[in-house]
Amino acid sequence: MQSLKNWFVLVAVSLFLAACSSSGDPEQVAQAFTRAAYAGDVDKLMELIDTPANAQANQKDMVRGKLQMMVAATSALAAQKGGVDKIETGKVSYNEDKTIATVPVTVLFENDEKTTDSVRLVKVDGDWKVKL
């Protein structure tokens, strides 16, 4: 009986980690990026964006600073509208070789307002990353 419980816990943790992974499909990454932006989670945003491998530390710091300004605005907007109720993604558009994707994302707020935007992604080493 204990091994069955352990198996269920292992499966649950595996599913959770897979859902949080940045290497998922473009919809998952776009949704995670949007959720992190409205939650003010700059560290998660930095994980999800495409930063060149040869980027210098000061360039990454500059991007982090711009993201902090962006999340301040989106967090304030979400608070003004009662918080985020849910985030939905639409049909993904790909380029010909499926290395670039555009995902429409709709944010539904607690006050029944909504906003729709598009998130552009690029496939980098097999993982989908947000292209800023």
Image: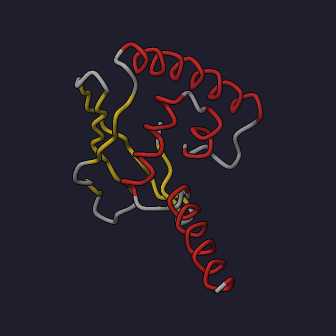
Hey, which quadrant is residue 34 in on the image? top left
Q: How is the image coloured?
A: secondary structure
* Residue in the image at 61% along x and 66% along y: 13
Query: Seen in the image, is 23 located left or right of residue 116?
Result: right
User: Is 60 in front, or is 87?
Assistant: 87
- In the rendered image, the residue lying farthest to the front is 1
Give the mark count: 0
Query: Seen in the image, is 130 located left or right of residue 103?
Result: right
* Residue in the image at 46% along x and 14% along y: 76
Q: Give x and y (percent) for residue 92.
A: 27, 54
Query: Seen in the image, is 97 located left or right of residue 70?
Result: left
* Residue in the image at 43% along x and 17% along y: 79
User: Is 63 in front, or is 110?
Assistant: 110
- In the rendered image, the residue lying farthest to the right is 57
User: Is 58 in front, or is 27?
Assistant: 27
Q: Give x and y (percent) for residue 61.
A: 71, 27
Query: Seen in the image, is 115 located left or right of residue 70?
Result: left
* Residue in the image at 57% along x and 38% along y: 45
Above or below 63: residue 47:
below
Above or below 38: residue 43:
below
Which image quadrant: the N terminus?
bottom right
Q: Give x and y (percent) for residue 19.
A: 50, 59
Q: Give x and y (percent) for residue 64.
A: 65, 28
